[in-house]
Amino acid sequence: MAFTSPSAKYQGTVNTVFLGAGNLPVGGQDALALHYFEGRLPHPPRFSLDVWDCDPGEDWAPALCEAYRGVMADAGLWAQKCVEYGADLITLHLKSTNANEQNAGPDQAVAAVRRVLEAVDVPLIVMGVDQADKDVVILSAVAEEFSGRNLALGPVTARNYKRLGAQALVHGHAVVALSPTDFNLAKQLNIMLFEMGVPKNRVIIDPTAAALGYGMEYCYSVMEQLQLAALLLDDRDIQNPIISFFGEDVWRTREAQRPALFSSGDPAQAQGVMLETAEAVTMLAAGAGILCMRHPQALATARRFLEQMRPADS
């Protein structure tokens, strides 16, 4: 007797958000992640690789430094290397603007964004440092300078959503709405953005991510709850693609900083690559529409997994 997979009937659809000059679509599904047998998943999850606007030096593990050797001092060259590795998007972290460290200003941030935009033609996510007032100054300058370039700007939080939401609205950008790992707080931030006029197809949710062994399971459960509410309950205040910045969290763990496990000493075999790959597969299952990663081998393995899960006729 043939096996018939049980299937659910979904009521809602996730909004499609278009990013970049090429209008890369994210979201749009009306079934849970990887549930091709239950509905339409028209746009595959997208993979991004991280770029910093300054050389991270010892802040990055040896396996990562090896993968980007020779380009980490130039954001444009670094972005080009990420595209060569297969990134669908670039996430530019404006780390130099941290008020407690280099405290770079808007001019330096704008210059870094320009270098990346001139170097690659994939969509760009521009992230501040989660310092509400400083991020407003920096990201407002970026939003205005690159008006109409369809960037994704973040983090937009409950502390700065009015100012950054307005900038994104005026200059034609999407926002990355960052909230603590809590369903109600994620929904509340969405509602506040919608009430001030930000279109629902210009919001990407970041419910925060944690590394494997450091809280990933709880983050998974919240992401799953968001997806169930959006699709099963047709909750239109939460029908937005999810972005997961787990790469940063994975690579700052003690486990990822360890030397290679194998006697060959090959950095590509570092434990951090394995951890990031495992996290990527988990986030795909949880419903992430954009996966922000760091190591190219982890990205390649996660993409192969996704291709193997996707039916040939979809």
Image: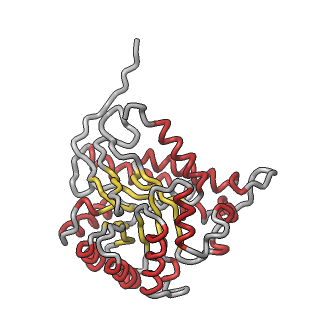
Residue at x 21% of width, y 64% of height: 199
Quick one: 307 or 182, which is closer to the camera?
307
Vertically, is 299 above or below 189?
A: above
In the picture, which quadrant includes the N terminus? top left
Q: Residue furthest front?
A: 118
Q: How is the image coloured?
A: secondary structure
- Residue at image location 49% in from the left, 51% down from the top: 217
At x 24%, y 72%, the residue is 169
Q: List x then y, in percent, for residue 295.
A: 59, 58
Q: Which is more toward the observer, 209 or 118?
A: 118
* Position above or below: 237 against 174: above
Outermost residue on the right side: it is 263
Tell me where residue 313 appears, x and y as whole percent. 38, 31
Q: Kindly tell me whether residue 210 is visible in this rendering.
A: no
Q: Residue 285: where, in percent of width, then height?
A: 44, 44
In the rendered image of this protein, does residue 122 appear above or below residue 197?
above
49 to the left or right of 289: right
What residue is shown at x 36% (from left), y 63% (from top)? 20
- On screen, 154 above or below 289? below
Res. 190 in view? yes
Question: Which quarter of the figure is the C terminus placed in?
Answer: top left
Q: Exactly how many numbered labels are in the figure?
A: 0
- Answer with left or right where residue 37 lies relative to residue 197: right
Image location of residue 32, percent across then percent down = 35, 42
In this rendered view, identify the residue nearer to me: 122 or 138. 122
Asked whether 305 or 313 is in front, the reply is 313
Q: Residue furthest top?
A: 1
Decide if residue 94 is on the left or right side of residue 190. right
Q: Is residue 161 left or right of residue 271?
A: left
